[in-house]
Amino acid sequence: MTKLSGTIKKSDLEGGHWLLVTKDGAQYQLEGAKGVKDGAHVVVEGKVEKAAFGIGMTGPILKVTKVTPADAKK
């Protein structure tokens, strides 16, 4: 399981999809993200599917299992 933090971005490419953009500029195309909002700072847990291809072709696909606000108290 992978845990990444970053900012949610909405891409309108190829019908639209959600991206996670990390602090170092890496992009992951989110699959299965529910209730996310453009510009939100979050921590995303899931599995990176390195061999999978998304129609948006904006980065590796991250199959999301959990999304929490980055500033959520533990």
Image (tube, rainbow, N blue to C red):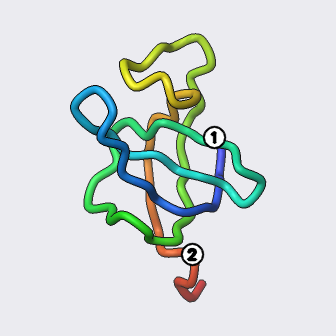
Left or right: 47 in relation to 2: left
Identity of the residue drawn at 57% across and 84% down: 71
Q: Which residue is mark 1?
A: 1
Of 11 and 31, nearer the camera is 11
- Which residue in the rendered view is the most extreme toward the bottom? 73
Identity of the residue drawn at 52% across and 71% down: 41
Q: Position of residue 38 (x, y in %)?
A: 36, 64
Q: Which residue is mark 2?
A: 70
Left or right: 43 in relation to 11: right
Q: Nearer the viewer, mark 1 or mark 2?
A: 2
Label 1 crowd (10 A; few <14 / some 14-19 / many >=20)? few
Element type where label 2 sits in the image: loop
Q: Position of residue 69 (x, y in %)?
A: 48, 75
- Count the marks: how many? 2
Of 64 and 6, nearer the camera is 6
Left or right: 43 in relation to 39: right
Image quarter of the N terminus: top right
> Where 49 falls versus 11 (above or below)?
above
Identity of the residue drawn at 60% across and 84% down: 74
Q: Position of residue 39 (x, y in %)?
A: 44, 69
Of 25 and 1, nearer the camera is 25
Name which quarter of the figure residue 73 lies in: bottom right
The residues tagged by marks 1 and 2 sit, at their Cα atoms, a distance apart of 18 Å
Hey, what amino acid is under mark 2? Answer: Ala
Q: Position of residue 58 (x, y in %)?
A: 51, 30
Hey, what amino acid is under mark 1? Answer: Met
